[in-house]
Image (tube, rainbow, N blue to C red):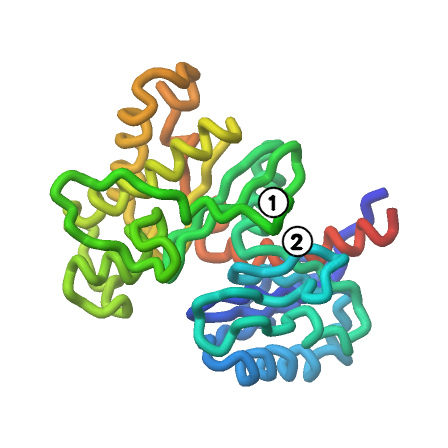
Amino acid sequence: MVTMPSIVAGIEMGGTGCKVAISDSNGRFIEQDSLQIITTTAENTLRQIHDWLAARKSYRPFRAIGIACFVPIDLDKMSKTYGYITTTPKSGWQYVNIVGTFQDFNVPIAFETDVNAPAMTEASLRSDTSVAYITIGTGVGVGLVLGSQPIHGLMHPEGAHIRTERFPDDNYSGCCPFHGSCVEGMSNAKAVADRLNISPSLLNTISDDDHSICNIQAYYIAQLCVAIICLTSVQRIVIGGGLAKKQSLFKYIRKYVQQMLNGYINVPAIIQNIDEYICPSILGNLIGIQSALDLAQTVINSEIS
């Protein structure tokens, strides 16, 4: 049984910034009932979010909370650290209890990665049963929905940490503290900024006409896309995040995916319609917070059914 949409709360927990919102009566995001904050310390960030929700609970009574959180996180409900951020390299955020912070609201809480949640929303909006969602920003993340279900298993997908083949003459050593030259270490915000000798905060000043860096970055993201295609055969790959706003990046990713597959995956989605197969989010910058709101709806539905 699927219920009618309810007023719910959503939290998009990002390594750089967080957004919290209370939906309208149809479960949709509304800008005037949301808050965007900078991610600082765990204590301060979570307190700001909690206090904002607490101040509105009496006159905007949300029925559930959905949290789409940066990784790695513990999704095993039998684990003592379920609902925690775990071994993140982000200073001061290791083993922080995210879900526990909001349990005093006494409503159901859905907890998911900040990439699986968007993959779930994209699959629903597009009527797909399988979708990969890649985010490119401070980090690089991969969410997977297969058979209309998000993939968990040992914990959750960490596809951005696969090894890469180097772009010709790219001497950058990689910035992943765990794996050096993995996909994330070669294509995240720091990796791009380091090659340009600028701060990551200045990346939004780089013109879309500067194709040289997009070309290099796309080469590594394309390797991730090819691995996803060959391993999961998803119906679509959606790419979002702060560094996925340049159309030239999509152009190069699609070109390299076709080159790397070399005709082996000979289907129209790859050969003829790759612009629709590897594409930006339907919701643009709102995909993260809307997917958190959608998570909250799913937990309501699951408790009723």
Residue closer to the observer: 167 or 70 = 167
Circle 1: element type: helix
In the displayed structure image, the side of residue 152 where residue 197 appears, left or right: left
- In the picture, the quarter occupied by the N terminus is top right
Q: Is residue 32 above or below residue 252?
A: below
Q: Which residue is mark 2?
A: 294
Residues at marks 2 and 1 touching, judged by CB atoms closer than 8 Å = yes
Residue drawn at the location 49% of the way across and 50% of the way down: 283
Q: Quadrant of residue 139?
A: bottom left
Residue closer to the observer: 252 or 42 = 42
Q: Residue furthest left?
A: 169
Residue drawn at the location 63% of the way across and 63% of the way down: 67
Q: Amino acid at mark 2?
A: Asp
In the displayed structure image, the side of residue 260 where residue 8 appears, left or right: right
Residue drawn at the location 39% of the way across and 23% of the way down: 270
Q: Position of residue 186 (x, y in %)?
A: 28, 51
Q: Is residue 78 above or below residue 94?
A: above
Q: Position of residue 229 (x, y in %)?
A: 45, 29
Q: Looking at the image, how many numbered discs can be counted on the residues?
A: 2
Residue closer to the observer: 160 or 292 = 160
Residue closer to the observer: 97 or 123 = 97
Q: Is residue 26 visible?
A: no
Q: Quadrant of residue 68?
A: bottom right
**Label 1 crowd (10 A; few <14 / some 14-19 / many >=20):** many
- Which one is closest to the eye, mark 2 or mark 1? 1
Q: Position of residue 259 (x, y in %)?
A: 27, 25
Q: Quadrant of residue 50?
A: bottom right
Measure the alpha-carbon separation of dots 2 and 1.
Answer: 9 Å
Q: Amino acid at mark 1?
A: Met
Q: Which residue is mark 1?
A: 120
Q: Is residue 143 above or below residue 98?
A: above
Residue drawn at the location 53% of the way across and 69% of the way down: 19
